[in-house]
Image: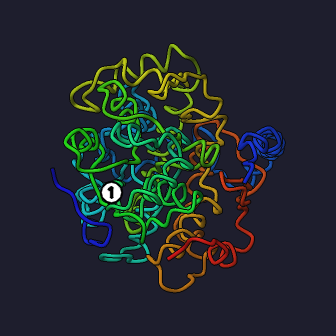
Amino acid sequence: MPMSSHHDRSEHAPKPDPRDGADAGRRSWLAGAARAATGAGLLSLVDPLVRAGAWAAGTDAPEKTEVKIGFIPLTDCASVVMASALGLDKKHGVTITLSKEASWASVRDKLMNGELDFAHVLYGLVYGVHLGIGGPRKDMAVLMGLNQNGQAITLSNKLLQAGARDGESLARLMASDKREYTFAQTFPTGTHAMWLYYWLAAHGIDPMRDAKAITVPPPQMVANMRVGNMDGFCVGEPWGARAIMDKIGFTAITTQGIWADHPEKVLGASAEFVARHPNTARAVTAAVLEAGKWIDASEANRQKTAETIAAKSYVNTDAGGIVGRMQGRYEDGLGKSWSDPHAMRFHADGAANFPYLSDGMWFLTQHKRWGLLKTHPDYLAVARQINRIDVYRQAAQAAGVALPAGEMRKSTLVDGVAWDGSDPAAYADGFKVKA
């Protein structure tokens, strides 16, 4: 199984309930949506390009009508797959060809060299490429969020037998039983690496000094744990659920337990492609937006989605291993089951899709925290370059999706530390455990 160490960059308190801010955030979102809806008529008067249905012909037609979108076999590729399966791509004047990729490094390389036009991709990967972290640099674009929540940190049954069931007991074990502990993530600058490091550090475990971090492609996580190559891993579904089904590990925490309604995968492209094909970027974003809206509309739609993406050409697993957590039904492998209020969501009235500047900036703060960035970037300027809110606004109008009140949002993570994007340098420097 191909693996690389964390250092191989070429591969490439009582805790507050994280739900406390959810209702307030939703009220803020709905208020913004109402204001956006009210202003839509005015906006259409001054900019006819953002009127729904204005993209059908002439200079507003997609410059490239056949596009290739890369994806990794994970549950959260669903809206990209369903945009094609439901014919929403053709509704917006494009035809999507899906390309199943073996690793995030492959996705990165193909986005950079033009083999892929777009991709279902890790948020932090896009930011890392844009800044040239650990590899070649290329200007990149985030067009929309594909989903929030829905990843998990899995620990091995070997750790369970030694007494580790959660972060606190894992920290005690690692302090008392000294050996090399190995944890896997999926890409050095990606979301899973950041969730894993954040969670370990929140329990006083330094992921750089107290453990070894390795990179493993998502579909290979379970097999690698089965043969003892790691003590734990962070990855997207359905591979957390698969580890439990195969009786090789258990869920120590979901990523929404670390940050409720956190950003996850995005629709990414190179900035060069978007500059050359702005109408195509808008059309594809609108199609994927509508697909996410359809998935979230009912449990029946989620069931249909699970059955569709389970196919060999997509995730290549049993639909039963996908649909449970996709519908918010969780079991941790230790006898606990629950209905998760922050399960994977693909639309949430647009809240899961808007490319908040603060979301992108958060990944930069963690890249700085862990030494991937040696100096503080201009956090806001970088986020404004990458997160193409202009394209998203046009696509949202074409898809009939409301816009939020602002371009930033506030959250409180598992360690009680609040993040709102207002002072990213102080936030990055303020953690006790850091590189």
Q: In the depicted view, which residue is nearer to us: 114 or 252?
A: 252
Q: Which residue is mark 1?
A: 182
Residue at 56 percent of width and 62 percent of height: 204
Question: How many numbered dots are placed on residues in this image?
Answer: 1
Residue at 38 percent of width and 37 percent of height: 161
The percent coordinates of residue 241 (x first, y second) are 39, 29
Residue at 41 percent of width and 49 percent of height: 62
Q: Dot 1 lies on which element? A: strand
Q: Is residue 396 above or below residue 175?
A: above
Figure quadrant of residue 73: top left
Indicate the amino acid at tag 1. Answer: Thr
**In screen coordinates, is 265 left or right of 72?**
right
Label 1 crowding class (10 Å Cα cut-off): few <14, some 14-19, many 20+?
Answer: some
Q: Residue furthest top?
A: 300
The percent coordinates of residue 300 (x first, y second) are 51, 13
Q: In the depicted view, which residue is nearer to us: 225 or 139?
A: 225
Residue 67 seen in render: no
